[in-house]
Image (cartoon, rainbow, N blue to C red):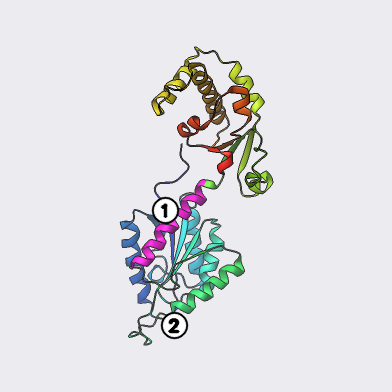
Amino acid sequence: MSRIPQQLTMGVIIGNRGFFPSYLVAEAREQAVALFSRLGINTIMLDPSQTELGGVETRQDAKICAELFRSHRDNIHGVVVLLPNFGDEKAIAETLRLSGLNVPVLIQAEEDNLDKMGLSTRRDSFCGKISLCNNLRQYGIPFTLTTQHVCALSGEVFEQDLRRFTQICRVVNSMRGVRVGAIGARPAGFNTVRYSEKLLERLGIAVETLDLSEVFTRIKALRDDDIRVDEKRRLLIDNADASGIPADKLVTMAKLFVVLSEWIVANDIDTTAIQCWTSLQENLGINVCSIHERDVRTTDAKRL
């Protein structure tokens, strides 16, 4: 089963600072609802009944928004911060800290119009974004920037940035808690695929190992007429032209397919890397490529 979420949910924070025009918060909220809805993204955000215009400006606003996010923490894949005006950088940073969320964060700041620089229309989001990002660095909260420092919330540039951000969220969500199956030792000729299991473990990525000698032993224990072997053999034949493969080698490939598939299921493996040569060729006289194509969770070690 794929770990990649198809339907994303974003927490949305709309920053505000009282010195600047607050009506811009309501305007940004309306535009955000329309944009996220059009892109098929669920949102969790404050409404005007919870804070002024649904924005975040004070410590109390931060606590209310953080509590809202905490109540949906299992569903939120990322947070998008919108700055329709300068915004209060400390309140936004505290919202993220208090929420306890550990998800990607995207920062958007609305661009000013040169003909609207009066007290009732000026945004100054440009400087507000600099202040917010500085605070997030102090708080140790990673964040993603838009292509342009400031951009229109309703514009094409931000839409493309948001689409890219959704892919980031999918990758992050999919990699958290992932279980990797390492089958066989690393091929000696490929130093490029060396890795540290301890470093991966720090990121919540578990590595389960399976020695090729165990694989060979399990293959030998399978009968040629085993129903599981016949099932995998048919899958291989249906997947590609196997007319040039000797019948006995096709059966051996099917047995390998059975052994790997059952090990993957038994250990809740999400993706695997296997020693592609030369042990399989020397001991079984087969390659593993066709099985890789049938099992999308398997990755050839030399191509990692």
Q: Which residues are magenta?
A: 154-174
What residue is at 36 percent from the left and 69 percent from the top?
Answer: 28
**Front-lying residue, 192 or 210:** 192
Q: Position of residue 241 (x, y in %)?
A: 40, 26
Distance between mark 2 and mark 1 Cα atoms? 32 Å
Look at the numbered disc 1 and give the secondary structure of its residue: strand
From what the image shows, is residue 113 above or below residue 261?
below
Snapshot quadrant of residue 180: top right
The kind of residue on which mark 2 rests is Phe
Snapshot quadrant of residue 222: top right
The residue indicated by pointer 1 is 9
Look at the numbered disc 2 and give the secondary structure of its residue: loop
In terms of sequence position, does the residue under pointer 2 or pointer 1 come before the other? 1
The residue indicated by pointer 2 is 19
What residue is at 44 percent from the left and 46 percent from the top?
Answer: 5
Is residue 282 at all visible to an observer of this figure?
yes
Q: Position of residue 61 (x, y in %)?
A: 48, 68
| 209 in magenta | no
Image quadrant where one finds the C terminus = top right
| 164 in magenta | yes
SS assignment for the magenta stretch, majority: helix
From what the image shows, is residue 39 above or below residue 204?
below
What residue is at 51 percent from the left and 58 percent from the top?
Answer: 104
